[in-house]
Amino acid sequence: MALPTPDTLVPGDRLGVLRNITTADGATGDLAVVEGTVSTAVDDLAGTSGVDATGWMSLPPLADMHAHIDKAYTWEMAGRPAGSLEDAVACWQRFGARLTEEQITTHARRALMAALRAGVTTMRTHVNFHEGVDPLRGLRAVVALRAEFSGLVDLQVVAMHGHLHEDDLIREAISRGADLLGGAPHLSPDPIAEMDRTIALAEEAGIGVDLHTDETLDPHSLDIVHLSRITAHWPADRTRSAGHCVSLAVQQPEALTEVLATAAAAGLSIITNPLTNLYLQGWENPVSTPRAIPPLRAIREAGIALAAGGDNVQDPFNPLGNGDMVDVAAALVIAGHLSPAEAWQVSSAGRSLLGLRPAAGEHGDVADMVLVRASSIAEALAERAPDRVVVREGRVVATRRLSTATVDIDTHAPKEITV
Ligand SMILES: [Zn+2]
């Protein structure tokens, strides 16, 4: 009897043995799931049952390490704005007070579902201190969703204050469940003082930070150096992440080497957000428009943990984000010049920043994976892997499938396409 295939899997199914599946290294063989863990032991692979995964790959699940789900799907509501980071920030300041907690919950839940069905099982989202009265309404909404998506998407919440917010409000955000402190010090009049304040508050609470860092093409903006120095003494497992780091893209080689060595020695991690920075930067340069993506290979070669984020989902900062890290990984290849395999690795690397068990498909790894119908990572990225099965601890938690059909030109009857 023919074995079932990944096409027939539905959420709730538990995987046994995946037959003839291709893994990230390009090898094809059998892979077993035993009590939520990957096994390649001969005994576990014995027998002839399981799922026939011919033509499918098992890849590490994706990790969106820089999201803003509290702002998602607001581009239309905000009046379809266009423009730079400064334009988007100004738009948000005009518009954001209108956003209610209920709207934030609806938008953020939709963004989490978009991520989950795409194969994102780990996410770090920043949450604004929202405009208008009750600035912590976004945080409350997202903290509630963190519980709602427990077991599906491991969600880490970053409370992102502005320089005008009082210390006590920031302390309240921490007490209400923020995992990390954030902020965008380069947007404040005194970035150094703002970073010092954030770090002091994080130390007081014993939590880590993830700051929007140097999101500008001004080469003089190197807040990453100060952030490295003031967190270098932290315990190794306390998060200090620098998001964006756009100005690294415009450093002279010697300066870049020095900055990266300082960041590496401090245990800093860098989160790149190629889609948003391709969109937000460079408006002032209509010719020779810069890409605004930091030097990814140099960052990795310096020994710095590099992860990636989708950043904005159809909001004033990027009208076209969609929560799918496969699009981000594709951009890391096209605009960031990583290989497809490197791009997938960077796009799934975030789970290690959360201290989660490895999910690389190796023997003993947790059986979290995304199955894609493709013969290589390059094909998966090129075609955006339309067919995916998302698996956590060996159990299918989400599926998405592309269905195509056309018409028979003579009979006018629908015609299935098989390729
Ligand atoms: Zn951001």
Image (spheres, grey):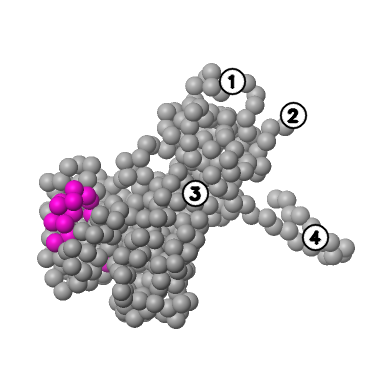
Residue at 56% of width from left, 55% of height from top? 383
**Residue 414: which disc?**
4
| Label 3 secondary element | loop
Q: Are marks 4 and 3 in contact (CB under 8 Å)?
A: no
Q: Answer above or below: position of 412 versus 231.
A: below
Residue at 68% of width from left, 55% of height from top? 403
Label 1, label 3: how many angstroms apart (C-alpha)? 29 Å
Please, what is the three-letter code of the amino acid marked with disc 2?
A: Met
Please, what is the three-letter code of the amino acid marked with disc 1?
A: Ala
Q: Answer above or below: position of 317 versus 181.
A: below
Q: Tell me which segment is drawn in magenta.
A: 197-215
Residue 407 visible to an observer of this rendering: yes
Q: Answer above or below: position of 165 versus 380.
A: below
Label 3, label 2: how many angstroms apart (C-alpha)? 30 Å
Q: Is residue 396 left or right of residue 308?
A: right
Q: Is residue 43 left or right of residue 260?
A: right
Q: Nearer the viewer, residue 143 or 70?
A: 143
Disc 1 designates what residue? 46
Q: Give residue 325's quadrant in the image.
A: bottom left
Please, what is the three-letter code of the amino acid marked with disc 4?
A: Pro
Disc 2 designates what residue? 1
Mark 2 or mark 4: which comes first in sequence?
2
